[in-house]
Image (cartoon, grey):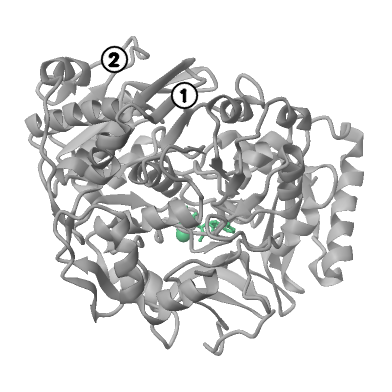
Amino acid sequence: MSYETMHRESIEQPEKFWAEQAKAIYWHKQPEQILDYSKPPFRRWFVGGQTNLCYNAIDRHLAERADQAALIAISTETNTRKTYTYADLYREVNTFAAILQTLDVGQGDRVVIYMPNIAEAVFAMLACARIGAIHSVVFGGFAAHNLALRIDDAQPKLLICADAGMRAGKVIRYKPLVDEACAMAKNAPPKVLIVSRGLDADLTTIAGRDKDYHALKSSHEGREVPVAWLESNAPSYLLYTSGTTGKPKGVQRDVGGYAVAMALSMRTVFDVGPGQTMFTTSDIGWAVGHSYNVYGPLIVGATCILYDGLPIQPDAGIWWQICAEYGVRSMFSSPTAIRVLKKHDAAFLKQYDLSALKYLFLAGEPLDESTASWIGDGIGKPIIDNYWQTETGWPTLTLLPGLELKKIKLGSPGLPNFGFNARVINEVTGADAAPGEKGVLTFVPPLPPGCMSTIWNDDERFLRSYFSHFKELLYSSLDWAIRDEDGYTFILGRTDDVINVAGHRLGTREIEESVATHASVAEVAVIGVRDELKGQVPIVFATLKIGSLEAAGKHDAAIGMQQRVVDLLGGIAKPAHVYIVNALPKTRSGKLLRRSLQALAEDRDPGDLSTLDDPAALEDVRAALLRGS
Ligand code: ATP
Ligand code: MG
């Protein structure tokens, strides 16, 4: 069936479409009703069906692929590589589930997981899923304050942490952060399970509360824990959005709908099936990590690679070495990560045999044309942009290479995925924007399976945040977009990032794209700052490619960037100023913190910086603003 036919059916006859897709997973009890949409925009998929994510990810595959690799955990921080077969994974997860039970964790209880990208984090997630506990993975390395906020929101029975993580060879102690967060939190968990890798020589424990994973493991080894069969709409996990625009929201996911969406997207989007290998470079603390480091690949019986380390460690060729060695078929990363590589020699892209690799998928933020071309030329593979959100759980705009690769249009993540009835709406009139006209990207509810059920404990915030923006009941992505004649969507930036120059509304994305076409530019952020005459003017912060020019050339580079914008977009968009910095402030998930840049440029307080990755980057921006260049 063609994409067009399938997509039409998914919108016009959703129950027929999803009943068919539901066959891809194992149901302990078949659903009684495919869709319950009696309380819009809330919807329940596969009502009355019983299933389990862990069973679908592991048990179901044992008969055919017990000895096949399920998880390959690679750390270039600790210099370790370990392969777990499906049989190994079954054993590890059962043992972990038995430990959870002795720690009094049961169905519906929340468990906070605060760990680096290591195999035990995956065991912990799947063990929770096995017994019906609701995991909430918090990005390891988030400060105590971030962790405390998430603890208070989820009210966990247990927190699972590593003793420490590592970054660029430096040990980052987690346990003191956990202790601090628990002291700050009003709803601190009664128990903490520590997975120690012997990285923290000064590890201290609190008697009665803290438990040692390895000690418990030896006494529970070999235990088998029966699967908890859950109603399809029971919560499976909570995941907080990255907090790029403000206070993170606890996205609540279900069980059955999510499993079905994972199975479908692995096939049609990522083109990875049983026995094939996927390498997703994300941290498990993000939505991509949940869906395509863990659940997606395992649900379809594939092999997933979990990577802990920097993309340039020991050198900028490491990811391609991994692709070559393990015969990776689909790789999934982010534009930010590729821009890190782009600062290094392109020769690193050509050192290894990438014949098994079919696609490189990128998501998480706008993929600019220069980055896409650089990596596409470098590895000689199609670069597949895809757009989604923590809220949606899986790609909403895609080119569906697993079904039939649609024509790639640089700058566009592609066409609406199945079940996503996308509309671009004019903010002012509330009517559909014409092709080529800017508007807000929305989806007509009911949202398809896999998307969030609600915001944890806050249905009201769910409605207010996503469904209250237009006269019609529409899910707002809060992103600004244009759709072309062929139905391709181009994302222009977040609705709160729009720059208004003398009444002209410009997307930060358009200007960034133009600046990025300058040969020396590695990374760029454009923001609007107050201007007495024009209301707002765009200003540019850019980093340059390593070795691209001497300090004396900075001035020329700045003028060159302004000229690129004038040439491509016209004088109205000309940046009032260009600042060249060593690093741009980003969230831990690699997204530009434009809100903080703008505050600094307007001499305001930069606001909540708890998700900021590298404080030095902000200092650098401050210095550049003072310097004036
Ligand atoms: P918060 O919602 O807490 O402010 P966030 O929106 O950064 O944080 P995520 O859910 O991780 O949290 O990111 C989703 C957003 O990332 C999208 O709404 C969009 O702005 C951006 N994005 C993701 N993929 C793409 C893409 N392929 N092209 C352009 N933008 C993208
Ligand atoms: Mg968001």
For label 1, the SS is: strand
Q: Is residue 307 visible?
A: yes
Q: Which mark is residue 110?
A: none
Relative to 311, 524 lies left or right: right
User: Which residue is painted at 34% across and 9% down in the image?
Assistant: 201
Mark 1 sits near ligand 1, with its Cβ under 8 Å away: no
x then y, percent, for residue 13: 36, 80
Relative to 194, 490 lies left or right: right
Along the line of sight, the residue nearer the viewer: 304 or 254: 304
Q: Residues within 10 Å of mark 1 (few under 14, many from 20)?
A: many
- The residue that mark 1 highlights is 74
Along the line of sight, the residue nearer the viewer: 350 or 250: 350
Three-letter amino acid code at disc 2? Leu
User: Could you tell which of marks 1 and 2 lies nearer the N-terminus?
Assistant: 1
x then y, percent, for residue 551: 87, 33
x then y, percent, for residue 414: 60, 64
Depicted 73 relative to depicted 280: above or below: above
Q: Looking at the rendering, which quadrant does residue 255 occupy?
A: bottom left
Q: How many marks?
A: 2
Q: Is residue 247 visible?
A: no
Q: Residues within 10 Å of mark 2 (few under 14, many from 20)?
A: some
Q: What is the spatial separation of the Cα atoms under label 1 and label 2, in whole angstroms?
A: 24 Å
Q: Looking at the rendering, which quadrant does residue 96 occupy?
A: top left
Three-letter amino acid code at disc 1? Ile
x then y, percent, for residue 381: 68, 44
User: Which residue is painted at 44% across and 45% down in the image?
Assistant: 273
Q: Which mark is residue 203?
A: 2
Depicted 602 relative to depicted 470: above or below: above
Numbered disc in front, either 1 or 2? 1
Relative to 417, 221 lies left or right: left
